[in-house]
């Protein structure tokens, strides 16, 4: 039987810009996490890196030189690797400096920006999105740390999301979501060769009113936890855990008053592992916002996991 858990809001930004499109929560040590505000409003050309401290409840926000799709802590304990617009770079919050190391990504097409990504060993795997959310022209990329090269794995996505790595029987697989397809798939991936194998559907959500957005795998590698971005009026949003072998829906975390869930992650706080869920105001007219009073809030919920799993820091030595 599917378990249902009600999440509670723990941080609601006072600045409406930070409520527009929060994504990418990522553990940064016990009781700390980073997250990105992808875009500070419908017409904004900037977003921010945010660092939240659960002990103090303080959120530090740092405006970036564009719209970030992702940001992950580096192994120096201070800086972050980020995908911003069409550039990969290192952001130093204390100095407010931005150092690009890979530019002109997706240069063969127009109207795309970097979206979701992940760190795997000394590599970055990330995708882009069509800003109009309709044309299959967005790329899926591997930035390979061994030779500092950018490799395009696909060029036919619309909104590349929900990335994770799992290892099964000595083989490495990429979990990936192209949101409009409403399918969670996995590909065999060969980092050394820079290639993907054929896609296998892990979870089919084509009959769902919502769209799968950000995702992680559980610490045991058996399940995927995916946030559902429901653009329709609803009393709550959902982030769901599916068994990747059977497709069974194991757990649903509900976010009352906020139907547009964007991204999950596991965070350690007070000696326990919690699920954090970001939610968004994006595309909501004012009348819908009145019916979704917690849209744009960050939620937290209990879990039975004993660890946060693998959340690597980006190794600066690979640059």
Image: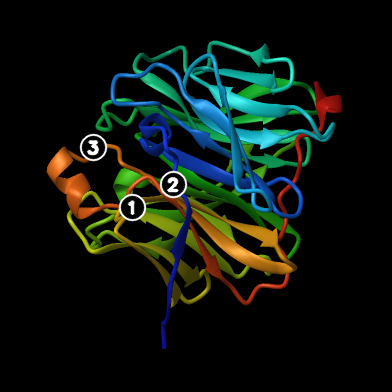
Badge 3 marks a residue whose secondary structure is loop
Residue on which the image places disc 2: 12
Looking at the image, how many numbered discs can be counted on the residues? 3
Q: In this view, does 260 lie above or below 235?
A: above
Assess disc 3: are there few (<14), some (14-19) or many (≥20) residues with their C-alpha within 10 Å of its C-alpha. Answer: some
Mark 2 or mark 1, earlier in chain: 2
Assess disc 1: are there few (<14), some (14-19) or many (≥20) residues with their C-alpha within 10 Å of its C-alpha. Answer: many
Q: Do the residues labelled 1 and 3 touch (CB within 8 Å)?
A: no
Q: Do the residues labelled 2 and 1 touch (CB within 8 Å)?
A: yes
In the rendered image, residue 290, in percent from the top left (x then y), is placed at 19, 49
Looking at the image, which residue sits at the far left?
287
Residue pictured at 36% horizontal, 44% vertical? 280
| Viewer-closest of 261 and 224 | 261
Rendered-image quadrant of the N terminus: bottom left
Give me the C-alpha separation between circle 2 and circle 1: 8 Å
Residue pictured at 56% horizontal, 62% vertical? 275
| Viewer-closest of 169 and 231 | 231
- Residue 94 badge: none
Residue on which the image places disc 3: 283
Assess disc 2: are there few (<14), some (14-19) or many (≥20) residues with their C-alpha within 10 Å of its C-alpha. Answer: some
Looking at the image, which residue sits at the far bottom?
1
In the rendered image, residue 313, in percent from the top left (x then y), is placed at 76, 40
Residue on which the image places disc 1: 294
């Amino acid at each position: 039987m599917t378990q249902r858990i009600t999440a509670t809001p723990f941080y609601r930004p006072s600045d409406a810009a930070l409520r527009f499109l929060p994504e990418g929560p990522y553990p940064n040590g016990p009781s700390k996490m980073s997250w990105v505000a992808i875009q500070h409003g419908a017409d904004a050309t900037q977003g921010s890196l945010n660092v939240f401290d659960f002990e103090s409840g303080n959120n530090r926000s740092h405006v970036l030189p564009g719209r970030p799709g992702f940001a992950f802590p580096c192994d120096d304990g201070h800086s972050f690797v980020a995908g911003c617009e069409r550039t990969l770079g290192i952001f130093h919050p204390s100095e407010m400096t931005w150092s690009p190391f890979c530019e002109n990504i997706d240069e063969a097409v127009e109207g795309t920006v970097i979206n979701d990504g992940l760190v795997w060993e000394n590599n970055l795997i990330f995708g882009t999105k069509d800003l109009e959310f309709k044309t299959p022209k967005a790329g899926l990329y591997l930035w390979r740390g061994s030779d500092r090269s950018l490799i395009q794995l696909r060029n036919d996505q619309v909104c590349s999301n929900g990335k994770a790595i799992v290892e099964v029987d000595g083989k490495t697989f990429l979990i990936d979501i192209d949101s409009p397809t409403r399918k969670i798939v996995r590909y065999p991936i060969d980092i050394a060769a820079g290639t993907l194998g054929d896609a296998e559907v892990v979870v089919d959500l084509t009959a769902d009113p919502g769209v799968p957005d950000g995702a992680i795998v559980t610490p045991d590698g058996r399940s995927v936890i995916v946030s559902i971005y429901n653009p329709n009026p609803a009393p709550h949003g959902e982030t769901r855990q599916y068994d990747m072998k059977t497709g069974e829906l194991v757990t649903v975390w509900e976010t009352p008053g906020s139907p547009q869930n964007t991204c999950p992650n596991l965070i350690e706080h007070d000696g326990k592992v919690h699920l954090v869920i970001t939610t968004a105001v994006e595309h909501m007219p004012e009348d819908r916002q009145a019916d979704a009073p917690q849209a744009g809030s960050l939620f937290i919920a209990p879990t039975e996991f004993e660890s946060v799993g693998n959340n690597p820091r980006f190794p600066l030595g690979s640059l």
